[in-house]
């Protein structure tokens, strides 16, 4: 992921202060260009998330995903709406189905800006379970 994409996601998540956020960023548990002390306390950076367990929790309100089929199926199974950012291969196709079925919204890589992502997340959260 490019720095401007990380910055857009980080900026949008930073503004959702009334939610506890878990962001799986891989084994290095570090965001390129973001200092650890700049990460707000409501955002937890982690190398691994037991995603299915997290989605099953009654407090889970939203999944932000790249559009992998396993993540989509888990979110659907637990009734968790999605905001998708397609990054790879079939992700865009998968997320178009999510949008068509009314299960979430998609923000393309080209549209990925803090304000656009935040708007999509707030829109989905306002209609979530």
Image (cartoon, grey):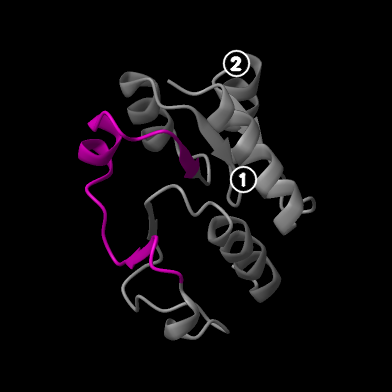
**The residue tagged with tag 2: helix, strand or loop?**
loop
- As drawn, the label of residue 102 is 2
Residue 97 spot, x, y in % from top left? 60, 21
- The question of residue 14 being in magenta is answered with no
Quadrant of residue 61 within the rendered picture: top left
Of 94 and 125, the residue lying toward us: 125
Q: In the rendered structure, which disc, 1 or 2, sits on the residue that comes first in sequence?
A: 1
From the top left corner, tell me how far across and down residue 60 is, in percent: 34, 35
Q: Residues within 10 Å of mark 2 (few under 14, many from 20)?
A: few
Q: Secondary structure at mark 1?
A: loop
The stretch of residues the image draws in magenta is: 40-64
Image coordinates of residue 81 in percent, x first then y, are 48, 27
Q: Residue at x 37, y 51 (%)?
A: 20
| Residue drawn at 75 percent across, 47 percent down | 116
Q: Nearer the viewer, residue 86 or 8?
A: 8
Whether the magenta-drawn stretch holds residue 42 is answered as: yes
Q: Quarter holding the N terminus?
A: bottom right
Determine whether, in the image, residue 102 is placed left or right of residue 39: right
Q: Which label belongs to residue 86? A: 1
| Residue 50, image x, y percentages | 22, 48
Mark number for residue 17? none
Residue displayed at 25% across by 37% down: 52
Q: CA distance from mark 1 to mark 2?
A: 17 Å
Tell me the quarter of the image containing the C terminus: top left
Do the residues bearing badges 1 and 2 touch, measured as CB atoms within 8 Å? no
């Amino acid at each position: 992921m490019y720095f401007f994409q990380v910055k857009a996601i980080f900026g949008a998540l930073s503004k959702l202060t009334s939610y506890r956020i878990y962001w799986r960023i891989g084994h290095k548990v570090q965001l390129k260009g973001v200092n650890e002390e700049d990460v707000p306390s409501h955002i937890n950076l982690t190398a691994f998330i037991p995603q299915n367990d997290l989605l099953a929790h009654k407090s889970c309100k939203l999944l932000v995903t790249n559009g992998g089929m396993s993540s989509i199926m888990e979110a659907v199974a637990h009734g968790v709406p999605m905001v998708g950012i397609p990054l790879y291969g079939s992700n865009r196709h998968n997320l178009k189905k999510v949008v068509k079925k009314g299960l979430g919204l998609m923000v393309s890589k080209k549209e990925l800006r803090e304000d656009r992502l935040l708007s999509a997340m707030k829109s989905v959260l306002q209609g979530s379970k």
